[in-house]
Structure formats: C-alpha cells, structure tokens
C-alpha cells in the first residue's frame, strides 16, 4: 500500500509543470498588428515612435488584449484546458507550492523553436519603426552628467552630479567590549542571549506518544491494541518527517514543529516584555534610591511597559477572554475572535517601542545531553523616524488608516493592531495606578474599543486613529526615557544580565489529546490533537495548549521542556581617530532609460514629472489585465498566463532593443528602469493573489535580475499617490543611481603587496518547483549569484558590480554543487583575478526555532574542498556574515554619515561575553561595519542600527594546512599589506549598494538573498490557500520562467 502511494505521489510531482511552450506560441500569434481589422486591439502596433522626443513606446497592453482575443477564439485552448499550470487542482497539504521551474515533459525542443519565432516576430516589428531619421542608437544617452543633472533639477535636487561624484567616507574605528572603562566612548549597545533548549525532536515525540498511550488507557482495555495504535502514530510521524517537507502533513509532526518554532518564539516574547519592564523598574528604583524627583516621563514608560505586560497576560492566561470581533456589518472578512490575531507571532511588533528578538546564524546541536544551543539578539525599536520624517508610531497609524479605508483580506490584523495601540498608550492624567486598577483599565479599554468598532464601524476607527495621532508625542517621551536608561552601563538590565541564566519551561497543558478520536476509527488517530473549532487556524489551538512558566514546570503539564536563557551585553567603544576617505560614484559612459507606466496614470503626469526626458523606452500596460476578481479555475489559469506573458514580453523586448541600441557601443550602457505603480507592492489593502501592483512588482524584480545577466541594470519603483511625492521622487532618483561604480581615494604605498583585483561572489538559491509530497531530487531551484570586482587605481580603488547570474537546477543534490559557481570562478580567473572572497549564506526558512533547515548549502567542507582542488592556483576565502542589532547610545545628527568599523581581529577588536565565544567556535570574525540609525518602517525590515560582521569559516577551509594558513594570514594578520585589499572589498560593497543622497553604507547589502516578500524575489501568489491549516499560497516563480527563457536566448546566440 505504501509503495502504491509513493508511486502516485511521484507521478503527481512529475506533472507539476507549466506549459510555457503554449504561452510563447500564443504570444507569437499576438505580436503582429492587423491594421485593417474590425477589432481595435488588433490594429494597434507593438511599437510606436516619437521622433521629436526620441522615444519609443512599447504597447504591451495591445498584446495582452490580443491574447484575450485569442483565448476567446479558443486559439490558445491549451492554456485553459489542460491549463497553463498543470495539476493545479491536486489536493494540497499545508506547504507553499512553487511552479515555474519545470515545463511540460517533451516540449523542450518545441519551446526553443517557439522562442526563436517570438524573437523574430519582435525583430520584424522593430524593423518597421526604426528608420534613417530614428535609428536605435538615438535612444542611447551619452552625455550622462548633463542628463542626470537635468532630471535632478526638475525634481528639486541641486548640484547632483557634483555631490554624487565627490563625497566622503567617515570611518570611526571601534571595538566590541563587555566592560569598557570609559562610558563616554560608548557608541552602541548589543544585547544578545544564548539559549539552551533541552531535548530534541525524538525525545519530544516519545513524550507525546507516551501521553497518547496514557489517554488510550482510559478508553481501551486491550493493552496490545493500545501499543498497536501508538506504534502507528509513531510510524506515520517518522515517515512524514523523513519526507523533508517544510509543512508536515502529519498532525503530530506539525505540533512538534510548532514546539520548535512558535513555542520558542513565545518564550522570547516573554523575555522581550521582561526587558521592557526591567528597564522601567530600574528607573523607578533609581529615583527612589537617589531621592530624585519623580519624572512624569519615567512613569509614562513604566505605565506603557506594564500595559504591554497586562495585555499579553490577558490573552495568554489560564482563562483567556473570548472577545468576539464580529465587525462584518462594517468590514468584510472580520468575523472572528480577537485572540486569533493576538496569538500570531509578530503581533507585538506593531508596538513602536519594543525589544524584538532575532535568531543569529550560530547554533549547535548536541546529542549527549540532547540539547540545542542558539544565539539570539534583541533589537530595541525606539519609535525611530522613517525616511519621510515620520515616527514609527505615526507611520503605523497611517498604515492602519490606509488599510481600513481600502479593506482586504488582512484587515483583521490592522484592526487588532489598532486595539493594541489603544490599550497600551498611557493615560493622559498621569495618575500612578496600582497594577490591579491598571489591569482593569486595560481590559476596559479593549472592550470599549471593540464596542466602538462594532457600533460605529469605519467612522469609529477614524476617531480612534485621530485620537491616537493627537497623543503621538507620548511615545517620543517614552523613547527618550528608554534611551536614557540604555545609556547607563549594565544596571538597567542587571536582573536579566546576571551570571545566572533565566529558566523557563514550555508546558503542554491537559486537554491536548482528543481521547475519543484516538480510540475510535484508525483513520482518526492520525489527528489526535483536540481541535475545538475547525473553522479556526490549527496553530491557535496549539497555542491554547501551551504555557510558559518561570523556574519550574507546571505540575499538571502533560509534558515540558526547559529553556535556559543567558542574557548578556556588549558595547561598541571608539578605538582610534576618525579616518576620512574621499569617495564617490563613477558615471557610466552611456545610459538607456526605461519607464514602466500603467495606462491608468497616463492622464496625470505629475507623479513622474521630471523623469520624462528625451531618449527613453516606455512600456505601457493596463493594470486591469494583471488582476482578477474571479477565483474559479479558468480565471486562475488565465491570470497566471497573463502575468507570465507580461514578464516574458518585457524581458525579451528589452533585450532585443538593447542589442540594437548598443551595436556601436564600446562599453555596455547602464540601464535605468523607473516603475510607476498606483499602490503598494503587496496587497495589504487588497488580496495579493489578485493584486496588479503585486504582479507588476514581482515581474519587475525578475526582470531586473535577468537583465543584469547582460547589462548593468537598476530598477526602482515610484508609487504615484500624491502625498510626500517630493521625497519619494528624490529617493527614487537616488536609488536609480545606486548601481553606478564606486571610486575610493586612498593611495597605497608601492611597497605594500597588492592582492587586487579581488573578486567577491555571493549567492543563494530559491525554490522554482516544489510540491509538498515530492522528494528532494524532484525539486527545482534557481541559483542566484551576484559578483563584485575591486581594482586598485593610481589614486585608490574602484568597485563595481559584475553582474547577476541565475541558473535553473533540478534536484537538491545538484543545487548544493551548482556548475554556475564553477563557471563564474573560471570567468573571474580569466580576468586575472586570483583572490576571490567566497561569501556563502545560510539558506532556509529562517523560522523562530530554525528547525529542519537546509542550513549549510554551499559552505560545507566537501564542496569547498572540491573548489580548492579545481582552482588550486587561486586563493578562495570562505566567509559568512551576520547582522547584529545595536542600540545607539547618543543623539545622532541625521546628516551625520559616520560609519563604525572593527578592523582589528582577536581580543583587540572582539571581546565577547562568556558563552558567546564558545558558540562561535568555528567562526573567526575578520571585519565588522556598522551604522547606528533607522530607515523605514520597522516591519519593512530595514533597520540600519547594527553591525554586519564577516566571519572566516574555520571548519570549511582547505584540507591542505599550508593553503589554510595562507588564507588565515591574509585575513587575520594586521601587518600583512594585502589584507587592506580584502577589507576594502567587503567595505566597498556596503557603500556601493547605498540608495541615499549621502554616501553612507547599507547595513545589509545582501537583502536580495532573503527578500521580505514573495514579490521581491520575483515570485507571485496565484492561488489562495486550499484549506484552513494551509496559510501558504500556490506560487508562480517568474524569475524561474525568465531564467529558462534567458538560457535559450544565450544558447542560441540571440544575444
């Protein structure tokens, strides 16, 4: 029976493909215009030129409209039945599924021919528009400085080119220390902890089976039957676990994964709230001990911290309230209990002031005793301002306001956040309430806000938001008090940072197991956990059955495991004088400017006024063709086909145009692409599966990555709503110019050995094709690699991005050793580069417990030794990096561009708390770069207050001791002259990826490796979850589709 099931699963997995060939053939049919056609859409040509403006319009809208016509005429029937996406209707388990990496079997040759025809049809259309008066090279911008200065002037930026080319790096050397002698030299504070989680999955499975055994004894007298049922539970759980799915099908496995992930996140939430309250209590005690007058600001912090604690306790206690959030009379999709949102991981991140936990890359699994050691840092969010000058609190209110005025599927989240903020903001009268009264006040506020929303709907929400906006200043005051406390060395957190670890227990409460189902039908025993209401997410029921207790397990718990947490702190301390280097951008020899413009914006030119300039390519399209209100199977298939067609056309047409434009160029031009959009990138206010903005954003990300394979390309979006347009236009322009090469002045003595040119390769992979029931060798991946090159010049250094490479591979084993890496090292070697920094990244879903990850994908010793053997005459430096949040301990001038660096190695640069060094035993820090500021909303994951540290992998070096010694000496010996080149290569990447007006570094320039959303990775959701416990959508990988098209174009010499 099991073999039959496996065969069925394998058959299904093999058919999870897209009919890319049929789509390309349909596009080929849709390209030619028919001038005399009765149908208007058939009359519009693909290209239209403006000889006065020297611009060319690409009418994608006409092609997509003709595609609709072909669908209606049933000339593209294969895209409807059997469908563009094959087997889309297969029953799904609770794992995200990916399509796009695999095409229908047997269509490979046909696809190549179809792409050939598509290219030729596009070329034919281009032949009709270019003429002697308007040749392709007229789209080339050659006076780059004049062009950029004109745009800058139009959008209100003065002396742009001069400031772009002539800037400074202000480098402040620092060190990490646990007990600095002079507090005045402290610039930042790093809070970290080591977690020891008792036991492992096997032990917890045994405990859970034992619980089931005890429950069965109450229902069944036959001991052999009890043993048989328990063994069945164990066997099914093990088989499900061995399938290596990220979302287990088996309920017991899902609960064990929940204990590894979400339950640990609940422990960290308890610690975060404790940190906040300990700081507040310290300030109160300090006032008492020093007989200081009571400050209202301190008591506002105290009240805020207590309110957060009480709100948390209210919903996580033994008898949590069942607050009915039925607002369906006013808001669609809001008919649930409030605790559903409150219990979600990340809910408390809506608070403007809160210590947010972040798991670092360091962890260790021990077998005897069975335990997991992990490093976790805490980032204090302190109501910082975003790039538009709004505090985190006001930005959060604006986001809630926007989503309540345009409600979508996530509206429950934003209503719940509104309730949270109303409950925790301190009272106006500044009365010092005792905890009992304060608890009653918090609970009363929650009930009143819910009643107001029920009675008044949007009007009531508007009044609540207006009231919170009026009181926004209170969070500035609280933030100031918190910062003052954090500046004080040690004592503010003394209770939590003592030598004794804090002990917590994760307890599984009675009532977890449904004994009746467990003792009933054999089919039912595979889901033995009690689910009271199957209309609610399963995780909510899991959360209801756990409690976190300090110091000791609860006596009536079914099972418990211990979590020891040792909190510690380090300081960033100034080490030497500030060093200033002259730096700036190098303008390219030529540019090609491209505009993506939705036709909905064509009547209002204000949003992009200033960017309009002679010599540009304009892609025109209607958002309406890229979204859908329908959810039937045919609509989903056609929507996926439209989105893929839009992406493919944009990419192929751009490459064909660039080929013509650059035929006479000695160097490849830089391509600047401005994407206009009518709303946000992802669907907070609307359903993202149907959102046009999300689709265009995902398409543009895939497009940018693949264009970068052949041309240096920078793409930037601009939301066309009118508010704050001045700032958004300026920021968009700065971001567009961020891809230009970097020059750094700093003459190096001739006597110093040079290692340049130095190459840096950094990469990761993402799913391109995966089904919950496939095996690892059937999965598809896109391997994505970014390359940088640093060269010495007569006056210093130059750094440029050397392209992004993307490759499709099938099978996890091949993904672990991709040929793409080998090829790129060979290419760099051919350029005379002998020193290459090999920057690997730990891949996997960085979940709260980080369980069952594919962690070491490209930095394991086996693969690296293969590289060392293949490239024996090169020096490869195996590094990883991680970012550590840091709290700034001084008031920062917004214009201050100081960068903090740890260049010294060993104890001179890194003096770490006890326990941290042990966990980092296989990692040697070689360089750190940090900034102490905040950019953007906290939940946009753009904190810039922290340090990014690079580590040498000690356990992944060459087996040849002599080679490893050479690597270590180059990186770690401060008196070795060539080390400056390696450090400069790492430093320069952070400045190169800067997207602001000042030349200051990005804290994490590798965010493309771990994007914040599907769309940012070039993926798009196409179908909603198919059952309650699956919160993951079906995903189409547009990047994988373009990678396949790109491979065909390169193989057949179309480029």
Image (cartoon, rainbow, N blue to C red):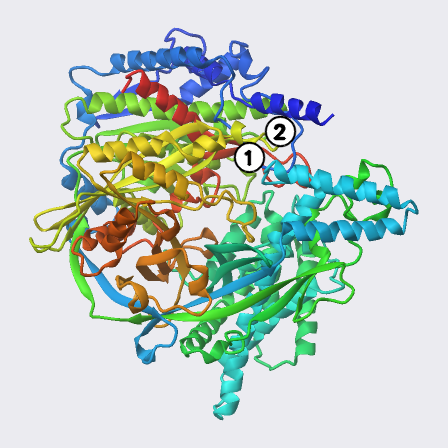
Q: Which mark is residue 689?
A: 1
Residue 393, horizontal then vertical, whole percent:
48, 62
Q: CA distance from mark 2 to mark 1?
A: 10 Å
For mark 2, what is the residue?
631
Quarter of the image that includes the C terminus: top left
Q: Nearer the viewer, residue 629 or 1033?
A: 1033
Q: In the rendered image of this protein, does residue 67 appear above or below residue 688?
A: above
Quarter of the image that includes the N terminus: top right
Q: Earlier in the sequence, mark 2 or mark 1?
A: 2
Q: Residues within 10 Å of mark 1 (few under 14, many from 20)?
A: many
Which residue is outermost to the bottom? Answer: 291
> Does residue 644 appear in this view?
yes
Residue 496, horizontal then vertical, whole percent:
53, 74
Q: Nearer the viewer, residue 744 or 661?
A: 744
Which residue is outermost to the top? Answer: 36
305 left or right, relative to 537: left
Secondary structure under tag 1 reads helix
Residue in the image at 85% along x and 45% along y: 226
Q: Quadrant of residue 959?
A: top left
Residue in the image at 31% along x and 44% along y: 838
């Amino acid at each position: 029976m099991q073999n039959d099931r496996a065969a069925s699963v394998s058959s299904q997995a093999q058919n999870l493909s897209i009919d890319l060939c049929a789509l390309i053939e349909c596009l080929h049919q849709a390209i030619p215009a028919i001038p005399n056609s009765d149908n208007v859409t058939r009359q519009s040509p693909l290209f239209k030129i403006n000889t006065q403006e020297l611009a060319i319009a690409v009418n994608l809208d006409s092609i997509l409209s003709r595609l609709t016509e072909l669908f209606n005429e049933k000339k593209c029937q294969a895209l409807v039945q059997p469908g563009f996406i094959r087997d889309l209707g297969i029953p799904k388990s609770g794992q995200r599924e990916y399509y796009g990496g695999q095409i229908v079997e047997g269509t490979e040759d046909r696809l190549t021919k179809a792409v050939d025809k598509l290219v030729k049809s596009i070329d034919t259309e281009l032949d009709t528009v270019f003429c002697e008066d308007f040749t392709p090279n007229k789209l080339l911008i050659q006076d780059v400085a004049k062009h950029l200065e004109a745009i800058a002037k139009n959008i209100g930026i003065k002396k742009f080119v001069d400031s772009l080319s002539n800037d400074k790096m202000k480098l402040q050397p620092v060190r990490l220390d646990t007990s600095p002698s002079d507090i005045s030299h402290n610039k930042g504070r790093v809070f970290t902890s080591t977690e020891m989680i008792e036991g492992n999955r096997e032990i917890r499975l045994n405990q859970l089976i034992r619980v089931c055994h005890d429950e069965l004894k109450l229902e069944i007298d036959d001991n052999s039957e009890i043993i048989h049922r328990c063994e069945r539970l164990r066997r099914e759980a093990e088989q499900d676990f061995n399938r290596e799915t990220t979302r287990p099908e088996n309920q017991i496995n899902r609960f064990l994964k929940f204990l590894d992930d979400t339950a640990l996140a609940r422990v960290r939430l308890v610690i975060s709230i404790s940190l906040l309250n300990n700081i507040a209590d310290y300030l109160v005690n300090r006032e008492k001990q020093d007989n200081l007058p009571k400050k209202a600001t301190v008591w506002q912090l105290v009240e805020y911290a207590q309110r957060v604690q009480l709100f948390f306790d209210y919903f996580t206690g033994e008898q949590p309230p069942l607050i009915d959030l039925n607002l369906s009379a006013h808001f669609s999709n809001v008919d649930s209990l409030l605790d559903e949102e409150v219990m979600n991981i990340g809910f408390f991140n809506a608070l403007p002031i809160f210590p947010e936990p972040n798991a670092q890359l360091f962890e260790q699994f021990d077998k005897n005793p069975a335990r997991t050691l992990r490093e976790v840092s805490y980032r204090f969010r302190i109501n910082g301002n975003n790039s538009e000058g709004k505090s985190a609190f006001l930005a959060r209110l604006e986001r809630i306001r926007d989503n309540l005025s345009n409600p979508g599927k996530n509206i429950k989240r934003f209503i719940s956040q509104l309730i949270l903020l109303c409950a925790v903001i301190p009272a106006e009268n500044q009365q010092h309430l005792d905890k009992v009264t304060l608890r009653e006040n918090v609970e009363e506020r929650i009930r009143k806000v819910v009643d107001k929303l029920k009675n008044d709907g949007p009007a009531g929400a508007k009044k609540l938001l207006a009231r919170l906006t009026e009181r926004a200043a209170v969070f500035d005051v609280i933030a100031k008090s918190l910062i003052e406390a954090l500046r004080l060395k040690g004592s503010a957190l003394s209770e939590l940072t003592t030598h004794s670890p804090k002990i917590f227990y994760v307890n599984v409460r009675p009532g977890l197991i449904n004994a009746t189902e467990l003792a009933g039908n054999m089919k039912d025993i595979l889901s033995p956990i009690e689910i009271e209401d199957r209309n609610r997410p399963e995780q909510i029921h899991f959360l209801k059955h756990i409690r976190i207790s300090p110091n000791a397990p609860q006596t009536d718990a079914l099972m418990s495991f211990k979590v020891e947490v040792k909190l510690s702190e380090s300081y960033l301390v100034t080490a030497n004088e500030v060093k200033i280097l002259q730096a700036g951008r190098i303008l390219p020899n030529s540019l090609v400017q491209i505009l993506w413009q939705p036709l909905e914006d064509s009547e209002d030119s204000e949003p992009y006024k200033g960017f309009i300039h002679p010599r540009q390519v304009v892609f025109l399209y209607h958002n309406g063709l890229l979204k859908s209100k329908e959810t039937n199977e045919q609509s989903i298939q056609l929507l996926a086909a439209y989105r893929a067609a839009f992406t493919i056309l944009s990419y192929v047409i751009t490459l064909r145009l660039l080929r013509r434009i650059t035929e006479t160029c000695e160097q490849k031009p830089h391509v600047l692409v401005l994407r206009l959009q009518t709303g946000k990138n992802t669907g907070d206010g609307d359903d993202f599966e149907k959102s046009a903005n999300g689709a265009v954003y995902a398409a543009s990300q895939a497009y940018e990555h693949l264009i970068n394979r052949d041309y240096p390309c920078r793409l930037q979006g601009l939301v066309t709503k009118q508010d704050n347009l001045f700032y958004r236009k300026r920021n968009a322009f700065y971001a567009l110019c961020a891809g230009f090469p970097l020059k750094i002045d700093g003459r190096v003595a001739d006597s110093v050995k040079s290692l340049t040119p130095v190459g840096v390769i950094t990469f990761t992979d993402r799913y391109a094709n995966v089904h919950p029931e496939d095996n690892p060798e059937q999965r598809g991946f896109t391997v994505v690699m970014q390359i940088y090159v640093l060269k010495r010049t007569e006056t210093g250094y130059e750094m440029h991005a050397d392209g992004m490479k993307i490759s499709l591979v099938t099978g996890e084993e091949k993904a672990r050793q991709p040929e793409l890496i080998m090829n790129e090292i060979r290419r760099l070697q051919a350029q005379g580069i002998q020193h290459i920094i090999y920057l690997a990244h730990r891949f996997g879903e960085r979940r709260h417990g980080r369980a069952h990850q594919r962690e070491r994908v490209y930095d394991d010793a086996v693969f690296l030794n293969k590289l060392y053997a293949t490239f024996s005459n090169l020096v490869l430096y195996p590094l990883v990096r991680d970012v550590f949040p840091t709290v700034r301990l001084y008031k920062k001038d917004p214009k201050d561009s100081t960068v903090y660096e740890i260049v010294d190695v060993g104890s001179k640069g890194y003096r770490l708390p006890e326990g941290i060094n042990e966990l980092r035993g296989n990692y040697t820090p070689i360089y750190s770069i940090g900034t102490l500021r905040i950019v953007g909303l906290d939940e946009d994951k753009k904190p810039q207050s922290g340090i990014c540290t690079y580590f040498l992998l000690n356990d992944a070096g060459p087996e040849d001791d002599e080679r490893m010694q050479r690597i270590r000496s180059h990186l770690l010996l401060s008196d070795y002259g060539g080390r400056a080149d390696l450090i400069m290569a790492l430093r320069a990447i952070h400045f190169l990826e800067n997207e602001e007006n000042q030349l200051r570094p990005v804290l994490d320039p590798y965010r493309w490796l771990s994007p914040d959303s599907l769309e940012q990775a070039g993926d798009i959701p196409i179908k909603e979850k198919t059952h309650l416990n699956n919160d993951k959508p079906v995903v189409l990988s547009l990047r994988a589709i373009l990678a396949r098209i790109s491979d065909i174009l390169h193989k057949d010499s179309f480029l």
